[in-house]
Amino acid sequence: MSMFSSCMLTLPAGQSQRSTFRRSSKTSQSLGSNWNLNKAHKLYFLVILVLSGDIQSNPGPVVNWKYPCGKCNCPVKTNQAGIMCEVCYAWHHCKCVCIDDSEYHRLQLSDEAWCCSSCFRTALPFHDSSTLNSTISSTSCSTSDSISSSLASSHGRDCTIVYTNCRSVLPKMDILRTHAASFGPDVYALTETWLDDSISDIEIFIPDYTIIRRDRNRHGGGVLLYVRESTPVELVTKHPSLELLLVEAKFTNSPTLLGIYYRPPSAGSANLADLECALESLQPSRLSNSILMGDFNIDLSKNSMQMLSHFHLTQVVSEPTRLTDKGSSLIDHVYISDHSLLQSCSTSPPLGSSDHQCISVVLKWSTRPIKRVKRDVWLYSRADWDSVNAELLSDSTTTHSFTDINSALSQWKNSFLSVLSRHIPRRLVSTRKHIPWLTTEIIRLLRRRDCSHSRAKALNTESSWSKFRSLRNRSVAAVRAAKWAFLKSLGSLIKSPKEFWSTYHALSPTKQRIPHTLTNGTITADSPFSKANLLNTHFTSCLSNTTDVLSSPWDAPVSPSLDSISCSPDQVLSLLSRTKLKTASGPDGISSHMLRKTSSSIHHFFTYLFNK
């Protein structure tokens, strides 16, 4: 008010404020063409502009961009490289999130979901915002801004352990496998599995995980551990009277003791005394690097528990772990021996319809990277087939001088693959087991569920929790519907052997497909060629005496003998051009796709082989 009063002193004497505004409004119509105002009027208008608080040289119209960038807020145009977050659906310039051209084209050709750094803090169930603030700010300009690459980079550094009271694991296996395929922690620890000896490990297996279990019955109790196959694990204690599992996991830094424990609500103090005796029986060196998780059924928000303090174990969970209509409680505990190794501890959405939250613990234990089987993949979409056929036709290598068919075929194969490698790019990829019915839409829905859970915990309102429960039920229904749709489509896999065996190996709990070494008596085979010969020798030896097998009481008609077979080049060309593209290649590495695309150049050689 003092500024406005001081500026009013500059008005001409005898002129009211009302007339000034009337005069200025008239004068403002001709400001663009005639600026005949005295100094007092000029100063008045300048003060009005200053007091408005919004001075721009050329403000222009206010535009609400349809696709503003989540970083710079500028529009993401159609002629610019942009990417959309799969969680918040916000567009970003690739240069703003530091995605180079190679990474941008890779994401275009893949089904991999991308998440921005803002949603990254709430997308992962085993990270909280406090631990990710510094990490994301320092790594926001890396090409691994996607969820899967960030998860892959986490293995080899920190150890991620997810614990929950699942309340019957068998009906929740689809959800658990989907969670493992999406986020992939190093260890799953489950209580109240409700299993017995009638349930085999095949029914509850997760790809790439080792199972250690202690069952009670199908109506309650039981504990279970899933440890990644890349981490060697050894059973230490399976207590006869307690629902307790103690295993030693050999991470890269040092052996670690993992414990999972369940105390029934009806159990008294004797159960805790037995747990104390079981821990005292261990060597002190093992307890120096250990973690003990479980459902103790002791609410730490109302009671205190000092029994494990003399083992130098610290309880790290601070949030309620069981949420019901009657209230919340902290009955799921996580005890660690060295609190300085704790990276983060947070709760995430429960497994299925369980009322116990998942507890995600990240520890500074170096984990072993998963060893993937790597293979060369030919990129046929970028092949120069015209140059391939031209070079094959001009190849001066002759096979007619060979008397041995095997030698001719071996030299031709080497020359053929050499020509292909010069004109067809290849890429080294690693194979991994996957859930066949897991789609990008399901992963997106799971991350929306996790984000909704984080918001519900922060707001703690009925509407936020209702939205979370709705997304949780939708995600469970989507996973089950996708699985049943996949099972209904299994009949079509019979027509495609490649897809059939790929699906079989994805669902099979076996670690390897073919043994590294085959032995038949004193003969040992370790290469694909020697294994095939060993199998052929074995099966032919089973029918060595064909006289007894084929003898019959009647005289079989004698068929005319077939002296020779002659094939024309046109017949061979017709067969090669009709080969099925979805069949797998043999040990020689030559696929049906190669034979079909080069049939016009190689049919003469195969005619020579067939007629030899």
Image: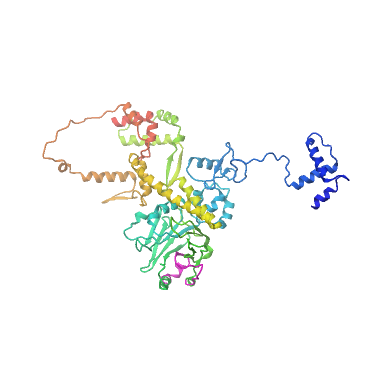
Left or right of 168 in this view: 28: right
Left or right of 551 in this view: 72: right
**In-front residue for pair 269/572:** 269
Magenta span has 301? yes
Q: Please identify the quarter of the rendering in which residue 90 is found.
A: top right
Q: Which region is colored magenta?
A: 278-307
Q: Residue furthest left?
A: 553
**Residue 310 in sight here:** yes
Please, is residue 448 above or below residue 393 in the view?
Answer: below
Total number of numbered discs in the rendering: 0
**Residue 124 in sight here:** no
Q: Residue furthest right?
A: 13
What colouring does the structure picture have? rainbow
Give the position of the C terminus as an image quadrant.
Answer: top left
Please, is residue 240 above or below residue 159 in the view?
Answer: below
Magenta span has 363? no
Residue 427: x percent and y percent?
46, 41
**In-front residue for pair 298/464:** 464
Q: Please identify the quarter of the rendering in which residue 170 is found.
A: bottom left
Residue 118: x percent and y percent?
57, 50
Please, is residue 417 above or below residue 159 in the view?
Answer: above
Residue 573: x percent and y percent?
34, 28
Residue 39: x percent and y percent?
85, 42
Left or right of 292 in this view: 496: left
**In-front residue for pair 322/162:** 322
**In-front residue for pair 251/105:** 105
